[in-house]
Amino acid sequence: MSTIIDSCALIFLLALGLVNQIQCDEVYDQFLKSSRDFTIDFLKVASKDGGNALVSPPSVLMMLALLQQGARGNTEKELTAVLGSDSNSTQVSYRNFLKTLTQKSPGVTMEWGTRLYPKKGLTILPEFKTNIEENFGTQFDEIDYKEVPPAESAGRINSWISELTRGQITDLVEPHMVNPDAIMLMVNVMFFKGSWRNRFKEKNTKMADFETSRNQSVKTKFMYQKNRFYTGKNNTLGIKWIELPFEGDTHKMIFVLPTKRHTLKKAMNQLTGDDLERIIKYADLSEVRLQVPKFKLKRKYSLPKILETLGVKSIFTGESNLSGISPEPFYVTDAFHEANTEIDEKGATASAATLLVISRQLILTEVFRMNQPFLFFIVDNTHNLPLFAGMVVNPTVS
């Protein structure tokens, strides 16, 4: 009888473990889906001015996830809606995500870091501090904003950002942001460098026309390569795409073109996160003569209006409720996102940093010829998740 009971108990525990694993998988799948949804929504808003665009959605989402951990009331509801998961599920998802994000891979360098810079003596609730250290890999670095000169405080934070981004982002924090009224600065940084699995030969790079519109074009350098690539097509959306793998096959870059010339904006307006998942996952191998421009992009965005458009509003107002972070009432007084990328014959380099400023006062043989505006994504294959997303309408403007 004892043996039967023991066996039943073991079966029960195994079944319980399986159920828990399935639930964790479902939570993580929802996290990835919501992240892809946010990627498309964020890119649409960031590219509304019609120029080149470049964003790193995971960097911004990380900041929102940290705020969610300390948000209460309507503020928590807004952040949960954008993140697509409640606070507990977000913890589980980020713990899993960060385990593999920066794993070493041949040909790819990944850096990721998150730091909070509270003023000296600010009371941070122990539960919040422990949570974001253990589940989100966050570090704390206290600064005496009243005693340390603003330029010195800004320099200290910028030095860390510059170190992680290999000097690509050097002055995100400006001295006026770290005035005596500042309570805390929150920063996330990401850096990516990947070498193409099949590099372009520099001798094949030539000047050619890139059509910025139906009636205008600019001269720029194009890289050429004939090889076998994974490509896809969606006639309903009117788009086609091609994958360029990086060494190690843990990451790839996807270029998206409209099937009808100069209809990128129309196609993009229809694009959803589910469409992006299909673009990332589904493609067929074929021989292609590829022509892609070399380009550099650098973009800096003020985030409040963008995030308000996406549904995150109360953190920028007197209605902000972040009482789970500290007993001191505060607001996100400003937020910025900066991203850079460079694409050449050897590979791709990209970096991004997101900054939240918090204080007591509210401030606010197919031919794939890419000679027209296009979208691009740098993707983490492990999670099928875009790390960077952008749009190029003029590769000569950095």
Image (cartoon, helix red, strand yellow):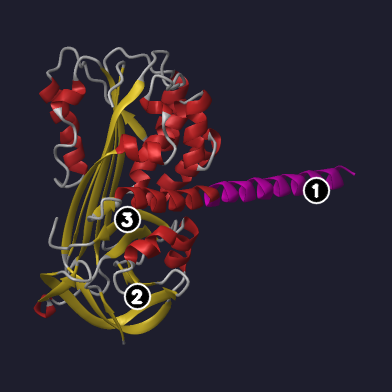
In the image as oriented, which residue stretches furthest toward the bottom? 365
Residue beneath label 3, please? Answer: 389
Give yes or no for contact between labels 1 and 2 (Cβ–Cβ under 8 Å).
no
Residue beneath label 2, please? Answer: 260
Please report the residue visible at 54 percent of the width from the left and 35 percent of the height from the top. 88
- Asked whether residue 356 is in view, the answer is no
Give yes or no for contact between labels 3 and 2 (Cβ–Cβ under 8 Å).
no
Q: Under tag 1, what secondary structure?
A: helix
Residue 7, label in figure: 1
Image location of residue 60, percent across then percent down: 35, 41
Image location of residue 278, percent across then percent down: 48, 66
Residue 38 is left or right of residue 215, and the answer is right
Q: Which three-letter amino acid code belongs to the residue tagged 2?
A: Lys
| Extent of the magenta region | 1-29
Question: Which of the two marks, 3 or 2, is nearer to us in this view?
Answer: 2
**Marked residue nearer the N-terminal end (1 or 2):** 1
Q: Which three-letter amino acid code belongs to the residue tagged 3?
A: Ala
Instruction: Quote the CA–CA distance across marks 3 and 2.
Output: 22 Å
Dot 3 alpha-carbon crowd within 10 angstroms: few under 14, some 14 to 19, many 20 or more: many
